[in-house]
Image (spheres, rainbow, N blue to C red):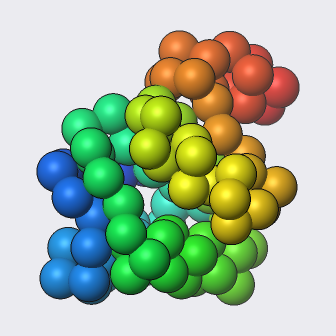
């Protein structure tokens, strides 16, 4: 049985919040999560530091043998992902329901 954890950052994902976010992801991985869903529903803006934090989180999860997914991105985040080609790196779902249907249904 896979252990799934959902991380939901709030507001602006920048340098300071990015560090908190990285720690939170490290903590859930250390606690044994092998699937991490980053729900960005309550994030209204991500800057380059926040994007770096997302990439770092993905590396943390992957190095522990897990998988990281992202859901509920707004238009600014979607555009940032497309401009930086991160939409090819992260598997993005519309929301938690789509994640549950597409990922959990296959388990």
67 up-or-down from 18: above or below? above
106 up-or-down from 86: above or below? above
Q: Residue at x 70, y 75 (%)?
A: 62
Q: Residue at x 21, y 58 (%)?
A: 12
99 up-or-down from 4: above or below? above
Where does residue 40 sit, x and y in percent of width and height? Answer: 38, 43
Say which of 7 and 84 sits in front.
84
Where does residue 51 sit, x and y in percent of width and height? Answer: 48, 71
Say which of 10 and 2 sits in front.
10
Q: Residue at x 56, y 42 (%)?
A: 78
Pick the quarter of the image with the C terminus. Answer: top right
Judge from the rendering whether residue 105 lies leftward or rightward of residue 38; answer left or right: right
Where does residue 75 sit, x and y in percent of width and height? Answer: 47, 34
Q: Image quadrant of residue 41?
A: top left
Where does residue 105 sit, x and y in percent of width and height? Answer: 75, 19
- Residue 37 can be seen in this image: no
């Amino acid at each position: 049985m896979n252990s799934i954890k959902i991380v939901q950052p709030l507001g602006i994902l920048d340098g300071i919040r990015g560090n908190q976010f990285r720690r939170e992801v490290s903590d859930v991985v250390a606690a044994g999560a092998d699937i991490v869903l980053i729900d960005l529903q309550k994030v209204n803006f991500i800057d380059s530091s926040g994007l770096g934090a997302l990439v770092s989180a993905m590396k943390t999860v992957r190095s522990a043998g897990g998988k990281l997914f992202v859901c509920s991105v707004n238009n600014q985040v979607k555009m940032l992902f497309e401009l930086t080609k991160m939409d090819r790196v992260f598997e993005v779902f519309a929301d938690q329901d789509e994640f549950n249907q597409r990922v959990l249904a296959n388990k």
